[in-house]
């Protein structure tokens, strides 16, 4: 009889632990958040930048016109590029999220074997904190920017753990839509046109039981001169169609909830 409360407590602890896993609103890959709550018809737009920013002003005008907020993740090299400073200031003044994308756009782990690290923890930590140091020049404080998007969108559990121990949460795009391939140019084997990229979004919506609910769509503020077919030029059409279908484009904080 005395053991019954103990057994009940164990069962309750197991149930609560199981519930937290099953009913967690966010989806994770290698401990990085890749999708938000699939029960809500919401999604987020995320943009990254390192070397290029030719689409920045057009993107910003489109977002402002449609009253949409997005999240911009830039490397330290991007933040310290004086040519990009007016754009960064405008992004901040318009209330968009400014985040870190590493300082030097390092490759963290092998393309062939994701478990194989190419850097150590010290190198990772210094590089990321150097990125945040550059952000601080624009009045962006670490405590206000909890999300970190890894360079090349490539990482493993070690990187996620190191990120967490620095006080940040690693996030990544939702796999499926090919918007992250907007950097490819016709000379590359994996080249995909902007119209084809757009179609992958609607194909994903059709195939996934939850449609586009909770997804993180990632593309770039600039991709260089080799690609003339810029995906950001289709952003007005993308936003219009998403809104027509009833999706709400929200900030990462709204999509992912409190961390």
Image: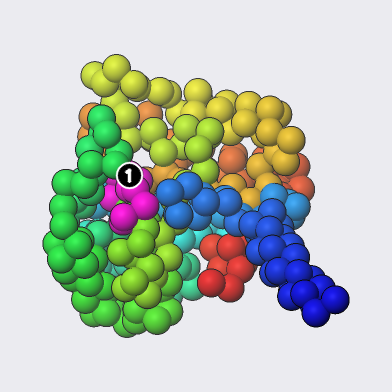
Residue 196 lies, with reference to residue 181, above or below; the image says above
Q: Is residue 18 something one can see in this rendering?
A: yes
Q: Which residue is drawn at 37% across and 29% down?
A: 229
Q: Is residue 66 something one can see in this rendering?
A: no
Residue 250 lies, with reference to residue 29, above or below; the image says below
**Left or right: where 111 falls relative to 191:** left
Q: Mark 1 points at which residue?
A: 154
Q: Residue at x 50, y 38 (%)?
A: 175
The N terminus, quarter of image: bottom right
Q: Which residue is drawn at 48% across and 47% down?
A: 29
Q: What element carries label 1?
A: loop
Quarter holding residue 20? bottom right
Q: Position of residue 236 (x, y in %)?
A: 56, 44
Q: Nearer the viewer, residue 207 or 120?
A: 120
Q: Where is residue 89 in the image (x, y as percent from the top left)?
A: 33, 72
Decide whether residue 140 is among the magenta residues: no
Span of residues in magenta: 151-159
Residue 177 lies, with reference to residue 107, above or below; the image says above
Q: Where is residue 74 in the image (x, y as percent from the top left)?
A: 30, 59
Magenta stretch, main secondary structure, is: helix
Residue 170 lies, with reference to residue 58, above or below; the image says below
């Amino acid at each position: 009889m005395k053991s019954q409360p103990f057994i009940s407590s164990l069962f309750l602890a197991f149930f609560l632990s199981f519930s937290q896993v099953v009913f967690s609103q966010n989806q994770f890959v290698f401990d990085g958040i890749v999708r938000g709550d699939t029960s809500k018809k919401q999604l987020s737009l995320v943009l990254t930048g390192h070397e290029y920013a030719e689409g920045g002003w057009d993107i910003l005008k489109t977002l402002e016109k449609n009253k949409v907020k997005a999240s911009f993740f830039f490397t330290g090299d991007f933040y310290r590029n004086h040519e990009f400073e007016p754009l960064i200031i405008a992004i901040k003044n318009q209330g968009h999220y400014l985040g870190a994308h590493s300082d030097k756009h390092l490759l963290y782990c092998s393309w062939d074997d994701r478990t194989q690290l190419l850097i150590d923890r010290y190198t990772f930590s210094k590089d990321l904190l150097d990125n945040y140091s550059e952000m601080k020049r624009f009045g962006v404080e670490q405590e206000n920017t909890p999300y970190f998007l890894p360079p090349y969108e490539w990482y493993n559990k070690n990187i996620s753990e190191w990120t967490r121990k620095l006080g940040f949460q690693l996030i990544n795009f939702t796999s499926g839509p090919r918007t992250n391939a907007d950097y490819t140019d016709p000379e590359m084997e994996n080249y995909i046109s902007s119209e084809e990229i757009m179609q992958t979004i609607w194909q994903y919506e059709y195939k996934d039981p939850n449609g586009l609910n909770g997804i993180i769509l990632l593309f770039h503020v600039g991709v260089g001169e080799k690609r003339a077919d810029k995906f950001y030029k289709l952003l007005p059409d993308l936003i219009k169609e998403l809104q027509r279908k009833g999706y709400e484009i929200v900030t990462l904080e709204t999509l992912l909830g409190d961390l």
